[in-house]
Amino acid sequence: MSRTDKDYEAQKEKLIHIALEVFIEQGYEHVTMTQLRKAFKLSVGGMYHYFSSKEEILDVVIQYGIQTLIEEAKARIATIPIEEKLLNLFSDSSLSAFVTKLYQYTDDNKNSLVAYKLREQSVNLAIPVVSEIFQQGIEAGIYKSDFPEEMAEFFMLLTKAITETNFLPKADKSKRKKRIEAFLYMFKVAINPPVNQIDQMRSAFDYTQ
Amino acid sequence: MSRTDKDYEAQKEKLIHIALEVFIEQGYEHVTMTQLRKAFKLSVGGMYHYFSSKEEILDVVIQYGIQTLIEEAKARIATIPIEEKLLNLFSDSSLSAFVTKLYQYTDDNKNSLVAYKLREQSVNLAIPVVSEIFQQGIEAGIYKSDFPEEMAEFFMLLTKAITETNFLPKADKSKRKKRIEAFLYMFKVAINPPVNQIDQMRSAFDYTQ
């Protein structure tokens, strides 16, 4: 990256942090591009150098937040044995202040566009990581599937669905437990993991309930 | 239902139709409660007799649209043999003018809150129908599962994911075909349908691509 590219990226990162603050203070739905531009301390021309719409700013804010989590998870699992990688993805990570604020905002606005987009990107951006774990696991002989990439997609979508409240109808505790058991059955037949990994996965989910 | 209840429901249905027109003309994001109230020709007090927020109006519009589809599908499958019910759900139905307009609006605004909510409700409201088909099928000996309700949830979520473009990352034609095959494998192990049902399901999906 050239000096100019670096400056541009550093400046854009600053704007992403400011944008999140503005969304939290004013609400994404209500804030205007003009208000964002003023918070960024940019001219009209300067603004379009970085973002062309409010929705683009939201997408970039969400991607920046999730990407932070993914990069951290990737670094964490890079050096551990393959059979521990998948479960480690679900272990607690220390969230950055940015990600904590983003989660707080969507917790407070569960049915907002921000929440829907965050959920969607949490699934989509994690798929390549899970897909790589499945493919490595198949090579190492601990998983078995003809569709590692697609199983990673379904795995992420279903884990999100059983741990969140919005993808599927609301559920009480006993219903959630049944969903977890049904999911673990699907996990077993989808990728044929070692038995102890199913038990570990069950504990990981119970912990989050 | 008393005369008054009937009047109330009939009037509310009229307002739902007007609301959709207003959303299409002005955009859900931009329209205000005052504009909706004026289109409804209601006083402030009259308005709160029916709806207390713009988001509630959206939720009711979407539920009304999807419920129309579900009721029609339920009537269609009520009298056909159990082994044909599931596939029949995916067959073309004649959409009402209301549902056609609603779909057109979300097609034109793919990343809007309206589109996210429509997708979510399409999954959630269809689950009881699929769940009943699975349960009837298990009793009739053509399906096998310990989790008919949960498999209906996963089934609806995954069929939506592989036929829509928004639940999972964008995919070209060959990738979509692979997703369908992975889904059919999951369908097979989830509920153990007769072999010809898997083939019929494959044709139904190919048709939609």
Image (tube, coloured by chain):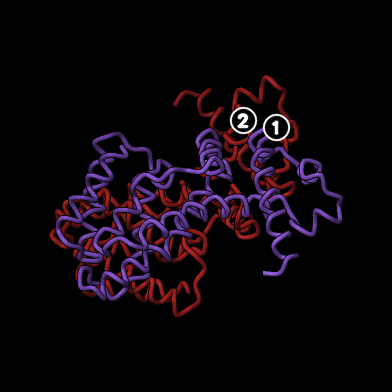
Chain colours: A purple, B red
Q: What is the quadrant of residue B7 in the picture?
A: top right
The residue indicated by pointer 2 is B53
Residue at image location 39% in from the left, 50% down from the top = A160
Toward the bottom, the furthest residue is B174
The chain letter under disc 2 is B
Where in the figure is residue B16, as x and y percent of width and height?
60, 39
Which residue is rendered at x = 71% and y = 37% of the image?
A30
Extreme residue toward the front, this view? A3
Give the side of residue A46 with respect to residue B13, left or right: right
Marks 1 and 2 share the same chain? yes
With A143 as the anchor, is B35 left or right in this view?
Answer: right
Q: Say above or below: B146 vs B4.
A: below
Q: CA distance from mark 1 to mark 2?
A: 7 Å
The answer to whether any part of residue B141 appears in the image is yes
Viewer-proximal residue among A25 and B66: A25
> Crowdedness of circle 2 by 10 Å Cα count: few (<14), some, many (20+)?
few
Do the numbered discs 1 and 2 sit on residues whose CB atoms are within 8 Å? Answer: yes
| Label 2: which secondary element | loop
Residue A16, given in percent of the width and then of the height, sits at 66, 49
The image shows residue B181, relative to residue B127, as above or below, that is below
On the image, numbered disc 1 is attached to which residue?
Answer: B33
Q: Quadrant of residue A101?
A: top right
Which of the image's four quarters has the C terminus of chain A? Answer: top left
